[in-house]
Amino acid sequence: MPARSFAAEAVVLDTQDHGEADLIVTFLGLERGRMTGIAKGAKRSKRRFVNKLEIFSFLHLTCSESSASSLLFIHEAELHSSFLRLRTDPALYLTASVIREVLLLAIREGERDEDIFRLALWALHGLDEGRPALPLLALFLLKFYSGIGYRPELQVCMACGQVVAPAREFTFSHLGGGLICPACTAASGGTGTILSPGTIRIMQSAQELPLDKLHRLVLSGPMLDQCLSALHQYGRHLFQRDIHAWSLLEPHGRRRRATAADQR
């Protein structure tokens, strides 16, 4: 009995050569979550796959399952968006690479999550439209950690339960994934990222706002640095490993901020 074909809206997260002509493609799909398939003859294709199976591309795929393999067969790909701007701007590409890496680390094969898929698309579209890369990354990570079940606690001290005061600094604990008040930080000798009241308010708002209103938040300067430091270190703890793309993004981001400051 022939395998049943199905359509999938998907973003390409990874590709690997397989033999001389084939590609193994990992993608995040709307209907089926993370999937991996093989595109036969993709590297020699002059029509079906040419310039389509690229990392970050948003595609409409026609696939089928195989009873003999866990890999899907990818028959055709139609391009919704290549996000071309990401491939020509190093800062945008590196930011998108961090997003791609955390998606690959956190999402398991066959795990479907429509909200995570729409969040990933929101981020890629935003970068492609020229929105500031580092603020967008911070907002993405706040939503992403919540989406995978590790929402940062930003309302109360995780140690004593004290409600976060609007005019006080708190420490963000990378190990606990939330705020610790000054008294509990001093008593425990704990470490983390100190967040200003303004940074905390922005992060709280980002957790609550829908995607189509996140662009209203302005995150820059020391507040952006604090937010990214907290989210980066929290991610390293969650995934129990470095986020490799971040090591390339950090020096690039410092150079861009220094250039912007010189221009002012």
Image (cartoon, rainbow, N blue to C red):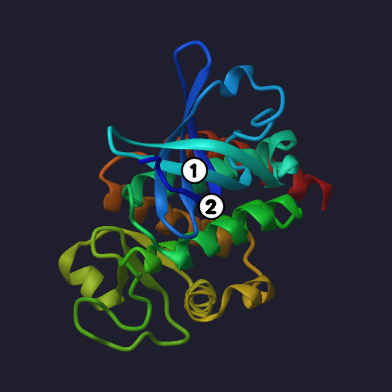
Type of amino acid under label 1 = Cys
Image quarter hosting the N terminus: top left
- The vertical placement of 70 against 4, above or below, is above
Point out which mark residue 7 bears: 2
- The vertical placement of 40 against 232, above or below, is above
Q: Can the viewer see residue 258 in this picture?
A: no
Along the viewing direction, whichever of 37 and 154 lies nearer the viewer:
37
- The vertical placement of 124 against 196, above or below, is above
The quarter holding residue 145 reads bottom left
Q: Residue at the spot x=22%, y=75% of the render? A: 184
Disc 2 element: strand
Is 232 situated left or right of 157 in this image? right
Q: Residue at the spot x=72%, y=57% of the render? A: 131
* Residue closest to the far right: 263
Q: Residue at the spot x=24%, y=69% of the render? A: 185
Q: Earlier in the sequence, mark 1 or mark 2?
A: 2
The quarter holding residue 181 reads bottom left
> Residue 219: where, in percent of width, then height?
62, 66
> Do residues under tags 1 and 2 come within 8 Å of each other at their CB atoms?
yes
- The vertical placement of 103 against 144, above or below, is above
* Residue closest to the far left: 188
Along the viewing direction, whichever of 137 and 125 lies nearer the viewer:
125
Residue picked out by circle 1: 63
Is 102 situated left or right of 68 in this image? right
Q: Residue at the spot x=68%, y=35% of the render? A: 90
> Residue 133: where, in percent of width, then height?
65, 52
Dot 2 crowding, Cα within 10 Å, few <14, some 14–19, many 20+: some
Q: CA distance from mark 1 to mark 2?
A: 6 Å
Type of amino acid under label 2 = Ala
> Residue 171: where, in percent of width, then height?
35, 68
Q: Can the viewer see residue 264 in this picture?
A: yes
Point out which mark residue 49 bears: none
